[in-house]
Image: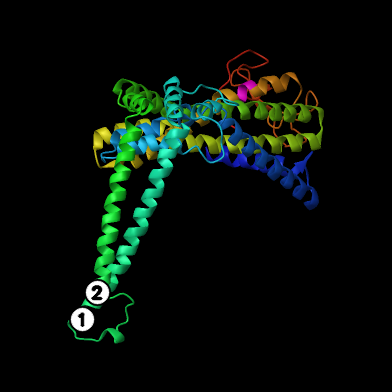
């Protein structure tokens, strides 16, 4: 096992730093590294773009967050606050809420929820010039209330100080406060009366806004639990599968690049095109790195993790730290499975040896050799092994002896 790993890294670094078994000079190596960095940057940019190709759950269900906040809100003014949100679009953008929601479909796969589009339509109906004026008036009166309350805090502080001076018998001329206690009390009373009046006017304006037909229809729509449940279920499902969909698109982006780079590398090796072989090898590595990173990101934050986390929460309750044990066991098993897959299928020694023998190539490095060469002049690998049955020389790694046809035991790489 360790011999194979050591051999893999030896071959990897040899291919990365040599052209036809000759080492690269320092300038060429720097150029290759700069090319790798440039391509890797663009690969990650492409991965980021394609990962956002499928519509995000928050874009597909743009009404969900507001709707959920409304459902969980327990304040008395929650109906007014949700209606007020229909006027937040007046910042120079002339598009309706429905248009803003639907625009998320442009350049993306997937559709926006029809229920959320209907939600946007209700908000657009509320957003009339008359209702905008009511909201503006309410905002002005609330600002006046805020100003008066701030003034009261200042006066109250001065009033308390003046009252203490009066109790202490200090003369008015020596007071540090501008307003006397009597006048401060009068101003406080006047401001409190004005505040009370403004608050009553604000309350009436809110009621006036909420009894309008469009507002009543919107609130009724919001209180339809069946529609909210449908949106909530669809949003949760979309959020659950979204990381898997992203990883699938990232695979679709990277796999063709990896296959093309490896194909060019193998072709260049067969033809003896050293520089093309080196560059294509670097490209295949550059394309593999983001793929591995994205797989680990998915394993850390994706659907599988959520599934395991839910099971762990159910089984262990608050002992979520036990999930670390699951990772410690799962990741090595997954790595073992990947290794076995590549060993048995992708880099199967027998399959590679059979094709290389047919093309008169070294069974280890795949370089072109003469038909009866015992050792490869490129990597010094011995090409033959003694048959256990007839004791004649036959090709290493092949399943049957070329002399007597006897089955051969697998020969490990040395």
Nearest to the observer: residue 323 or residue 340: 323
**Number of dots carrying numbers:** 2
- Residue holding disc 1: 166
Viewer-nearest residue: 299 or 2: 299
Per the image, label 1 sits on a secondary structure element best described as: helix
Image disc number at residue 266: none
Can I make out residue 321 in this image? Answer: no
As drawn, is 259 to the left or to the right of 31? left
Which quadrant holds residue 67? top left
Colour mode of the rendering: rainbow
Residue 190 relative to residue 296: left or right: left
The x and y percentages for residue 73 are 29, 38
Disc 1 to disc 2: CB gap under 8 Å: yes
* Element under disc 2: helix
For the residue carrying disc 1, how many other residues have a C-alpha within 10 Å: few (<14), some (14-19), or many (20+)? some
- Residue at 63% across / 12% down in the picture? 405
* First to last magenta residue range: 347-351
Residue 93 in magenta? no
Horizontal and vertical percent position of residue 18: 76, 43
Residue 349 drawn in magenta? yes
Which residue sits at x=75%, y=33%? 376
Q: Is residue 134 visible?
A: yes
Task: Name the side, left or right, on which 348 lies relative to 236.
Answer: right
User: Gap between marks 1 and 2, in whole Å?
Assistant: 8 Å
> Can you say whether 321 is above or below 183 in the image?
above
Residue 51 in percent (x, y) is at 56, 32
Mark 2 sits on what residue?
181
Residue 359 picture quarter:
top right
How far across and how far down the image is residue 96, in percent?
52, 29
């Amino acid at each position: 096992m360790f011999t194979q790993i050591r051999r893999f890294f030896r071959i990897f670094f040899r291919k990365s730093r040599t052209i036809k078994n000759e080492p690269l000079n320092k300038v060429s190596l720097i150029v290759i590294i700069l090319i790798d960095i440039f391509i890797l940057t663009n690969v990650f940019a492409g991965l980021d773009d394609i990962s956002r190709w499928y519509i995000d759950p928050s874009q597909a269900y743009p009404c969900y967050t507001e709707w959920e906040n409304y459902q969980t809100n327990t304040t008395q003014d929650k109906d007014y606050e949700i209606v007020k949100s229909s006027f937040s679009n007046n910042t120079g953008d002339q598009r309706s809420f429905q248009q803003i929601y639907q625009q998320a479909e442009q350049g993306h796969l997937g559709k926006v929820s029809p229920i959320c589009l209907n939600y946007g339509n209700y908000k657009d109906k509320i957003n009339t010039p008359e209702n905008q004026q009511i909201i503006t008036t309410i905002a002005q009166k609330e600002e006046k209330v805020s100003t008066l309350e701030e003034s009261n805090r200042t006066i109250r502080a001065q009033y308390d100080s003046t009252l203490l001076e009066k109790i202490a018998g200090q003369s008015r001329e020596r007071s540090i406060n501008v307003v006397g206690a009597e006048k401060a009390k009068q101003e406080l009373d006047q401001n409190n009366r004005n505040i009370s009046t403004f608050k009553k006017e604000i309350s009436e304006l809110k009621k006036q806004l909420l009894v309008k037909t469009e507002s009543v229809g919107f609130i009724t729509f919001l209180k339809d639990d069946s529609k909210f449940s449908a949106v909530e279920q669809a949003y949760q499902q979309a959020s659950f599968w979204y990381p898997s969909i992203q990883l699938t698109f990232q695979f679709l982006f990277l796999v063709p690049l990896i296959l093309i780079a490896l194909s060019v590398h193998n072709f260049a090796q067969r033809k003896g095109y050293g520089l093309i072989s080196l560059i294509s090898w670097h490209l295949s590595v550059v394309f593999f790195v983001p793929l591995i990173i994205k797989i680990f990101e998915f394993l850390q934050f994706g659907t599988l993790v959520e599934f395991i986390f839910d099971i762990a929460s159910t089984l262990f309750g608050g002992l979520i730290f036990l999930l670390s044990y699951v990772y410690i066991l799962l990741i090595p098993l997954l790595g073992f499975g990947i290794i076995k897959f590549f060993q048995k299928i992708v880099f199967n020694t027998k399959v590679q040896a059979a094709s290389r023998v047919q093309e008169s190539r070294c069974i280890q490095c795949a370089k072109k050799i003469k038909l009866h060469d015992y050792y490869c002049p490129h990597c010094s690998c011995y090409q033959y092994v003694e048959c256990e049955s007839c004791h004649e020389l036959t090709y290493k790694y092949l399943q049957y002896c070329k002399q007597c046809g006897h089955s051969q035991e697998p020969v490990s790489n040395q």
